[in-house]
Structure formats: structure tokens, C-alpha cells
Image: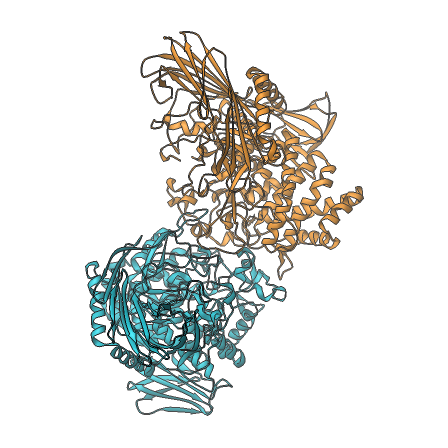
Chain colours: A orange, B cyan
Amino acid sequence: MENDIDNIPGGLEAEPWCIRERGLDPRRAFLHETLFTLGNGYIGMRGTPEEGHGPGGALKGTLEGTYLNGFHDTEAIHYPENAYGLARTNEFMLNVPNAKRITLEVDGALFTLDSGTVHAYERTLDFRTGVLARSVEWEAPSGQRLRIDSRRLVCLQRKHVAALEVAVTPLDFSGTVRLLADVDAAVSNMQAGDDPRVGSAITGPSLQLVGREVGETDVLVLQRTRNSGFLLATATDSVLDSPARLERLAGGHAFEVQARRGETIVLRKFVAYATSRDMDEGQVGAHARAEVARARADGFDALVAEQGAWLAGFWNEADVVIDGDDALQQGVRFNQFHLLQSVGRDGKTNIAAKGVTGEGYEGHYFWDTEIYVFPFFLFSRPEIARALLQYRYNGLPKARERARQMAHARGALYPWRTIAGEECSAYYPAGTAQYHINADVAYSIRLYWLATGDLDFIAQCGAEILLETARIWLGLGSWDRQGRFCINEVTGPDEYTALVNNNYYTNAMARMHMTFAADMIERLRAERPGEHARVAAAIGLEDAEIAAMRAAGAAMRLPYDEELGIHEQDDSFLSKKPWDFANTPQEHYPLLLHYHPLVIYRHQVCKQADVVLALMLLSNQFALDDKRRDFDYYERVTTHDSSLSSCIFSIVASEVGYRDKAYAYFMETARLDLDNTHANTQTGVHTAAMAGTWLGVAYGFGGMRLDEDGLRFAPALPDRWTGYRFQVHVRGALLEVAVGPGGAGYRLLKGAHLALAHRGRAFELNAGQPHIHMGDLA
Amino acid sequence: MENDIDNIPGGLEAEPWCIRERGLDPRRAFLHETLFTLGNGYIGMRGTPEEGHGPGGALKGTLEGTYLNGFHDTEAIHYPENAYGLARTNEFMLNVPNAKRITLEVDGALFTLDSGTVHAYERTLDFRTGVLARSVEWEAPSGQRLRIDSRRLVCLQRKHVAALEVAVTPLDFSGTVRLLADVDAAVSNMQAGDDPRVGSAITGPSLQLVGREVGETDVLVLQRTRNSGFLLATATDSVLDSPARLERLAGGHAFEVQARRGETIVLRKFVAYATSRDMDEGQVGAHARAEVARARADGFDALVAEQGAWLAGFWNEADVVIDGDDALQQGVRFNQFHLLQSVGRDGKTNIAAKGVTGEGYEGHYFWDTEIYVFPFFLFSRPEIARALLQYRYNGLPKARERARQMAHARGALYPWRTIAGEECSAYYPAGTAQYHINADVAYSIRLYWLATGDLDFIAQCGAEILLETARIWLGLGSWDRQGRFCINEVTGPDEYTALVNNNYYTNAMARMHMTFAADMIERLRAERPGEHARVAAAIGLEDAEIAAMRAAGAAMRLPYDEELGIHEQDDSFLSKKPWDFANTPQEHYPLLLHYHPLVIYRHQVCKQADVVLALMLLSNQFALDDKRRDFDYYERVTTHDSSLSSCIFSIVASEVGYRDKAYAYFMETARLDLDNTHANTQTGVHTAAMAGTWLGVAYGFGGMRLDEDGLRFAPALPDRWTGYRFQVHVRGALLEVAVGPGGAGYRLLKGAHLALAHRGRAFELNAGQPHIHMGDLA
């Protein structure tokens, strides 16, 4: 990461359906590569130019990255002082060959943006088409002037496929144009620096060449990962629309054209990646070739059309409209678009903290998925949410192993951070100690159940996850002398407070988890006795365990301070010294980069929402006055150094009636990456905050909640907006909620009827009969 | 460490003044190398044979080690997940060239203990002579039989010098005997395994050759450490007493003799080490040569005589006699002898956890010095104790730097483990978090003051240490809502409980520390105004700080559980789940090698004395009933997985009247290394436990305490003993305490008079007038 660009905001104009770069700012190149990333939940292709950068130019030091979600190598983790049970193996997402490379020479002069003269430059990523388009007018150092138009897409409907097109038009000359289309297989991951938010050390190149075939116009590169042993195929095929001298090179092909002034030459390149993580090893190369061939046969324009149609379907059911604030509108859609680009949909992959846009956090999946991202997909594209749960189900065997390493005789403990299920957290106080991951997964299952009523899923996968993970609480917790069930030595969501006893969030979520697990298994027993018997046998479930879960839930210690009238973050939080914010210079944030963990941990200071997150997730368990006091107290001690914080504060601020704060926190979330407010979007977008934006609209301004008390809304209209609309898939219906100055309207876009409530008043919504609540806003 | 020998006890017979090995047991070779180590507080030379072991023989896999106290290289510490302020640089004691090597060939057959036939073998390390002697009768594979007698010493009065002698006698043949005396400079440290008690990874050889000179019979090797940049000289000179053909080789000399049956050939080798850590770089080589030359001129027998005389002086004033238990007597003297061999006396070095006997804990100094080892030297050789304090004074500048890294604007924070003052603890929860190190140093100054009344030291060094280190408590601590001064997020002595609030030991010691610091600076102000002004100016001391220290001390939170009537180890200790000892198999100890830290930390389980240590150190602050209840409670939850534990439990058991327990714990301590009860003496002796043995006699059975209430004793006689005697240097006097079945006697061996107390009754002891308390034992 280049220090001098860390704090540059995106500088992009507010447009509702795209991001657009006019002119080229070298200071922003690294950041914009992330913002302009294309992805389809599997392939992620950073927005680097197809021709690359000149080696010594102003644009050097950026990150040429292409990633495949879940495709990883492993490295042993070494600790300077070892201890039993520490995570032993890191899994990290690999930078794979750069197959999009197309370089251009004009009469021997190599085109790069940092050579010659760029007379015009514009680049657009359109959320409706899913196409990254660039138009450049360039004058070579030797004087030739030409226009280069390119388009690129990563196919949302074709997991393995990407394609691009480069059109070159000589403007004031005729001469030799040489286009080189190849595969750069000599790639490697970034070197990790000292920033714990990037990654760990990698000891050597991960991809080892197995074979390379350069055919008539096609290329196939086969590589194997060094430690994880996966086979990777990178296939391309390149098609020029003009007569050319074709030269076959070691890594690709050169097309040499005698170009004429004003006549456009078009090169199209079709790309596919496949790996043995997805299919039998023997099929990998053939599959990549076949996908390239199919794409080529369909043609570039067909791919563009297909992409647009698919996205139209998405926006049709997921679009959030904000009237009166273009910058926010852009941020909201940008975030939704990137979530869609980042999320794995195959049940074997998930959504990484940085999606497939960069190497921050090494492509790891965290609780971010369940608590932040999951609701967005659940209510926008439920089948994707289902796939995310499937991923966790597939992770149960590894989670059982991990539980044994952590001395739990029964149950399953999910890893804090992982790709393929190994615990990859090399700093356990802010990693493995976050046992709440188990409850977070359970929470997402509960939300899925509430939103879909899908008992098949509960029977097939959900109950097993719920019970295996709930067992951990019984082993972890203990009864104190006052007869309370305590959970000691854990870390809650707030990573500025570690290894505490009775973290409020953890305990409250564990209570929800155990109670819900018990409810679900008893429902199965009543409604699906056969399925119940299968699940109980599979995990050796005893009735006494269910009783123990209910008893522990009922007696759970939930710290509350009578004097302050607030929920205490943990047993000792309020006994600690308040952080001296007045004497903390601005440049000492984020604190984690400027203070030893011991210094941070011994103070009352929070990185992020913790109790406040519980207020939102377990909304119906709290009185409004308590929520307000909690919000007031924790807001004073929270730095929001985590990108997971502002959206939650925005939602709870909405609920307790702090309209200005709700708006301000929402702004921080909605444009976090566009404005690079955390100064590290260069290494990837923040998917949790992106999803938090949707939550900020629906849960925050819309006041939406879904729990045992049903689906309800309590909409407010921020002062600067003239209106907003969002959609919710729930119980098979598609609900539109529209809020304007006059009130709120509800209508069913799909489905026959739906029970819900507006500001505490229940009503039934039927197809074709919208409900409008005039003037009745929160 | 070879697993198959981990659990082998020493197997040595109980003799009062030596350890003796009869016959050779390959399983014990690695362990015995440690036990037979010679040292003088600077050089440490493991008890490997001068001829080495055969490369593939039964004795391979041991550790050929020579160390110089404080002589170290450094390596950067890399963390798989980094954080601000973590220790950045490790310092580790280096294995230096093996200068004692003398190999022997008989008619071309190389002598090693694992070849040919060993007909007789005996080795002795005598605590009175300080000489390691070995006698071997060996038959070569080709049939020649000979006796090889060797003696070796590391000169206690010559910091840089060691010497050895090898005498070879052909028993049944005449033939060619070739003795090769050289310096093996191709040495390196052990490879660290996964055991956190050994060491961290070292990336490459540390000693790089600068030059080598092989003279007529002398060798000089100059090397430089890779990162720390120290120059090391290793010098030898070898003298044969018989005519020989002398051959000069690359690394030394070969002496070839036509030996005759029954006639003895003697080779003597004089060795010196010097480094630029001790002197100007330009002198290093010359000094080593000069010391070798002086030793050679004096002669081997003169060195032996000098060593014996010096040791006679030591034993005369420090010997502890135990009548009726030879095994204990041996253990006690073995431990005293090794402490003397291990302790640095130059103010630049200290005493490592493993002395200079091995690479466990990398030659680091810990709090073990102040709390365990210091009292032994204070009461046996006060000038050595003074040098240990000087070491800490010299470390103040680094401790100030470390305090700033830890966000303390004022004061000095000593490193948890170090050689030259850098914090080398790479796992902060059981390292840097042990802030009690500051109070431990203060405690040793207080004890020194109480034992010597040396106000000069307080003025010159002590006050500055006391106040700079006490300032940390003011910055670290905070006031809770009940008006108590709290110290949060620290780790106490018990490393099975980490990052807690208000650790009893830490808070009680901090109170002592702040109060004593305030007392001493006010005494200086009253008695030495000039010195007071100098100290106050040097550290910018303000009167308000003294007042703040007294206020914090007075309001210190000291957890006490009214229900159980015990001092709580920290705010949450008693709320945790008791460890399930009944279901912990024996092979799961020590727990740290079988359970994740989170599992250990969330349970009520102690590695070692914590509250119980406070009971001993701050003895006059506790009622006897409280002590007994504390002992009872904490004994049940303590594993003694640390070697620092048993001696303290023995002492407090004595005090509360548990005679059998006192004896049993004492046995565990006194023969910990001889019996290898911690299964890791191979990598070095346990100096703290060794000193704990002396404490067990004087503080435990002798009931000695020295605090503001004066010097006092409350002797008891263990059932198996017929009597015991120990000596105490105090206030310029040398006191002998003798305990027998009939009672206890006190007499002054030096000094005119001394005030003390026997079982609560004060009396004055005068020269020539012993006091005997008949029948009045505890």
C-alpha cells in the first residue's frame, strides 16, 4: 500500500447508475482499481487497464489482481512463541494469472497511460449493464494519435467466464498496429506489510506451472498450487476482426495490422478460469476451454446483452431508490452491485470481507457474512442466502474438529476467519476468542426461518448446525455461585475489548441461539418425526441437552448497570478507565495502529458496535429507554475504527429518534468505499459496510424488524430526502415499501398476501391492494 | 529435545558434596550434560565430553553448548498477525565456539564413548573444588586398552578463563597416541521446536568468522555476531608434557606421541573468551590471549588450588547443612553451587532462567531474579545482590523507552524477559502484561535496604529506579466509581490466568512499591537533601506524584471474598469454572502443552503461586487464618506446572503449620533438576527453583522474615531431619541459625550485634554470646 494515496477519496461524480472516472489521477489509480473491479461471485478482476502500467511510471505500485472466490493456497502459520491449539494453517485467496492482458504497439511505441500524452480519458462502470468501458485518446511519444475504446465484463451468468474487447482507431496516421493478447502467469500475491488488516507473510510463489499450450488463437495455462494442491486452468481465445499477421508467442499471440487512419480494429478476448476445487481434476482444462469456446461462439455482444438482462432482473427486485440525494443513491447502488459481484453462490464459497476485489484480509470469510451481508441477500435474492447457509453446513466437519482442538467434547465451533473451514485467525484474542461466531450463524438461520418458513432446510441442514453449534455454549459456559449461566474468556464483536467475561452481545446471542435450537428440534420432533430421528441420531442428541440449553438460556447472565441504567458490555467494562479522547490526536486513529493491545483493552473504548449491535439484532428484548441510554453511553466511547460500526449506529439512532445522527452514520457507511474513508479500500471494498447500507435503509430509516413478533416497519424520512423505496422478499412475497413526505406506502409486487405492521399497527396486505399510511412517519 | 529422554530422572547417588556418574547411560547423556555444567557467572560450559560424541552413536542428539552470560545476537520477531507495540527484537544467548575440544586417536582409532568398549567410567562434579573430573577405561575396537583421566574447570575468580587437562595412559600396549586440541567454531544454537519453554526460531548462523590465527601451540578465533555486531575472541593454548610431533592444523594442533604402556601423557589446554560487550573492541583479542597466557604461566594445578580456595570461602559463609537426609543435602548444595556458577557479577549481566547451562528460555532474565534468586545472594553474598540491582539500574534507559511504547508518558517499564534490556516477550498475555515486574524489582530494592541499610545505593541508584517504576502504576491504574484504585488488564505471576483486572499480587505489590518509593524519596529529602535534589531533577519529580502514589496505595483495590474468606486472585477468578482435575489425565500436564490458552484462562486453575506468593512476600500484611484459608483454596487449583511454585507453597505450608506438605513441596523443589521432575532440565537448570530451595530452608523451615517489623525466625524441624543450619548476612553481620531436635540456636559468626526475634520474642544477639531456644520450635 502506498502511503501517499492512503487518504485520497474516490473523487468520482455522483451519478445514480454508475461510477465514472474522467481524466486520470495517478494518486487514485490504486483505489480506483478496487472500485472498478468486475466480479461474478467467483471471478474477481480488479480494474487495472488491460495494457497494464509502464514499469517506472506514475502508476506503478498498484495491484494487478485477479481472484477466484475460495481458490486458495495454504501456508503454515509460525508464531514467535507457540501455544497449544493456535491456528496452524493459513488459507489465502490467490492472485491468479492475468488473462485480460492486451497490449498495444503503434509503430513500435508501447501504449501505456503513463507514457505519451493522454488527450482524453473516461472510464465507466455501469451498474445496469455490468460492463466496464473505457475510452482513451492517446498520442504516442512519436506523435501518432489514436483512440482506444475498451469494454470488459465478468459474466454474472457464467461462473467461469470473462470477456473483453479493445477497439483501436488511428486518428491521424496510418501505420503498424500490433496487439498482443497473452496470459501473464507470473503473478503473485502482495507482500504483507505491518498492517494487520492486510495479510500475513507468504513464503514463496504459490502457482507452479504444469503446462502451457498456445494454439491457433487460444491459450491454455495449467498451474498447481504449491501447498493446497489445486489445479488451475486459465484459458483464452482472441479474435481480431481485421486481416492481420498472426504471430504465436510463448504466452499468447500478436496480431499485427496495417491500420488505416479512421478505421477501427477490434480485438475480442474470451477468458475462462476453472479449478479442481470446483470439479474433477481431469475436467479442469477441458472445462475452461469449452467455456471459452462457448463464449466465443455466442459472441461478445451476446454476452453483453445477457449480462444486461440478468442485471435488469436483479435491479427489478432489489433496487433501492433514494430521491433527493444523488451521492447517496450512487453509494447505495454501488454497494449493492459490488455485493452481487462478490458473493459466492455455489454453496462452496461465501463472501469475503473484501469480496473478490483485493487481498485485504486474504479473501477470508468472517461473521460479516451472517450478521451484515446475509440479510441483504435474504431479502433481495433469497436463493443466494440459502447458498450461504449451505456453505456453513458444508463446514460442519471442520468445525467439529476445531471444537475438539478447543477441548469441547461435543459440538462444532466455526472458525473466526477461513476460506475452506480451517481456523485462520493467527491472533486468538481477536479471533478464536470470538465464540459469538456460532451464535451469528444461528442468527442467520433463525432469520432465514422467519423470512421463508423453509422447514425443509431446517430438517436437512439447519437443525444440525443449530444444535452442534449450541452445544459449544454448554461446554464453554459455567454456573456461578449466584446460579447464573456465565460465559467467560471470550471476545465480543468489539475488538478493542478482548478476553472478557460475560460479554453482553455474546451472552444475549447465545441465549437466543440455545432457545431457538431447542425450539427448532422440538418443532421437528412434532412435525417431522422421521427427520427429527435422523438428525438426533446423526449427532447423538440427548434430551438432557435440550433441557440444559433451555436452562442455560433462562439463567444467562446479562450484565446491567443499575446506576447508569445501561447494559454493561461485559462484567468489567464499566470499571475500566475511559479513553482520553480529548488528548488523542486525529492521526492516532485507528487506535489499533498506534497503541499496544494492552493499552486499548484496559480502557473503556470500543472499535465498533457491540451492545448496540445486540440492540438491533435482538430488538424486541429491549425497552426503548434502555436503547437510548445504551446508545448514548456507547456512542461516547466508540471510535468506529471498524467499518462494521457506523451502519449499526445509524440503525439504532433511527430507532431512538436521533435523526441527524442516523443520517450522518448512514452517510459514513454508504460511501465508505467511494470516499475511501477507512483509507484502505485500495486493498478491497468493505462488503459488510456495503450490506450495512442496505440495512441502514431498511432497518434504519425503514424501521424494519423481523422476529417472533412478526414483520414490521416504522419508517422515517431523512430531512434531505424527498423519498425512498426498497423491496423485501419475504414469505414468498415481494414487498415494496415506499416512503415520501406524505407518508409510507406498502404494496405487494409478488405474492398474494402478507401480514405486517406499520408503527405498531398490524395489517394484512393483499395483492393489488396497496396500503398507504398518510403522514404517519416515525 | 529428544522425547525418549524427557522423563528420565538424574539417577545419581546421594552424596553430600558432589554429583557422581558411575557408568554411562545414553538416555541420560543430554540431561547430565546440564547437571555437569561448569560456570563462573560468565562462561557456561555444558558437561559434554571434551572429545565429543560419535556422529551416529547412541549419544547423538545432545547439546554441545558453551555460553557467555549476556553475550547475544538479535533477530527481528515476526508475528503472523501484527499489532502495535509488540516486542520487535529478540535477544538470545549464543552458543559460542567449543574451545575445550580435545580428541584422541590410538593407532588411528578415534576415541568416543559410543565406540569400542568402555570398561570403567566415572565422572564427578565436586562442589568444593569446582572441578569436573572423569576417569574412563576404554578399549579401542582394535583392542588397545587405555585409561583417560580428565579434569576441567571454569575459573570462578577469572571471568574469562577455563582450563582442562587430559591424561592418557596406555594400559596394555605401546603405540601412537594422537591428541588433537582445536577450537570448533562452527557452532550454532538449537533449533527451536514447538515447546514455548525453549526458544524462538533463529534464521541463520549468528557468528561470522572475522579471523583465525593458529600459532605455535595457541589458537585465536575472532567472530562477529550477525545482527548485534559484537566481536568475540576465543583463545586457547595447549601444552603437552611429553615429547611429541606437533602438527599445526587449520583449527588447532595435533600432538602425536609414541606412547609406552603404563606411561601417562598429559595435555593441558587453557581457554579464554572475551567480547566487545565487556570491553573495547580493540582489546578483545589481546585480552583473551593475555588471559590464556597468564593461566598457562600459573599452571593448571594453580588454577585448581585457586578455585578450591575461593569455593571454601563461599561455603564457609553460605553452606546449608541438613542432617539426616543425604538426598536433600545434595540437592541443596547442588542448587547453591549452580546459582553461584550462573549469576552474573559485573552489573551488566544478570542470572538467566536457566543460568548458563542451556538454551531454554534463550538466556533471558526474568522476575525470577528479583523474587527468587536475589534473596539467596543478598543473604549469602550481598555484593552479588548489589551487582544484580546495578544491572537493573543500567537498564533504566531502555525501560523508559519501553514505557513510551506502552503509552506511558512518564516512568520506566522493565521488560518481562530480556538480556540487554529489550522486551523480548513475543506473547504479551504472559509477557508484557506482567507489569508486576516493576514491583518485583522494587521489592528487591526494599529487601536490600532492609538487609543492608545502604542509603548510598538508594541515593545513587535505588531511588531513581523506585520512582521511575512506581510512576507506571499511576499511569496504568485508574479510580473506579467506588473510589478504589484499580489496575486493569494485567497478568499476575500465575500464567494460567491472563489479562485480568486487579490481580491480587500485582495490586498488593504495587501498593508496597508506591509506598516504599514515597518513603525512600522522603527519607532522602530529610537525610540527603543534595542527593534528593539531584534525583528529583534527573527524573523531573513533582511532589504531587508522591502524594498520588500514597493516595493510590492507600485506596488500592485488593479483592477479598467474604463468603469464602479468601483473597481473590483477581476480580473474576472465583467466578470462573473450576478446572476438572478428576478428568485430566496425567499425561495432559503441563496443561500449557495440551490446552489452548483460552481453555486454560477461562477456568479456575493456576500454574503457580500467585496469591500464595503475596502471602510470603508481604507476610506481615496477612492474618494467619487468612493465610491458611488462602493456602487451602489455591492449593486445590494449582498444578505447579511452573518450577517457581513448589518452593513458595512449601514456605507458606510451613507457616500455616502443614508440616508434611511443607516437606513434600520442598522435596519437589530441592531436587527438581537432579530428578528432572519438569522433564526439561536437558535444556538447562531452573535457577529460580534452585534459589527457592534456599528460601525453603530459611523462609520455610526457618520461618525467617525481614520487613519493617524486623528480622525474625520461627524454626521448625522436619520430622525426617535430625537438624539443619544456615547462615544469613544481614546488616553487616553473619548470623548462623542452627536447628535441632532440642531447639534453635543463633550465633554471630561475624559482626558485633544484631536485633532479631524468635517466634515473636525479640532479642539482641552479641558476638560470642549465642542464644539457644530450647524446645521452642514451630
Q: Nearer the viewer, residue B110 or A338?
A: B110
User: Quick check: can you spot residue B522?
Assistant: yes
Instruction: Answer with the quarter of the image where residue B256 lies.
Output: bottom left
Query: Residue at coordinates 39% horizontally, 9% vertically from top-left?
Result: A171
Image height of A239 relative to B581, above or below: above
Q: Nearer the viewer, residue B615 or B584?
A: B584
Image height of B738 relative to A418, above or below: below
Image quadrant where one finds the N terminus of chain A: top left
Taking the image as shown, residue A444 lies to the left or right of residue A88, namely right
Instruction: Answer with the quarter of the image where residue A768 lies.
Output: top right
Taking the image as shown, residue A690 lies to the left or right of residue A7, namely right
Image height of B96 relative to A186, above or below: below
Q: Position of residue A415 (x, y in %)?
A: 57, 46
Q: Position of residue B507 (x, y in %)?
A: 44, 63
Query: Residue at coordinates 59% horizontally, 17% vertically from top-left?
Result: A297
Instruction: Answer with the quarter of the image where residue B585 lies.
Output: bottom right
Q: Position of residue A777 (x, y in %)?
A: 61, 28
Taking the image as shown, residue A543 lies to the left or right of residue B719, namely right
Q: Position of residue B385 (x, y in %)?
A: 32, 72
User: Quick check: can you spot residue B411?
Assistant: no
Q: Nearer the viewer, residue B657 or A70?
A: A70
Image quadrant where one finds the C terminus of chain A: top right
Figure disc tally = 0
Image height of B709 relative to B196, above or below: below
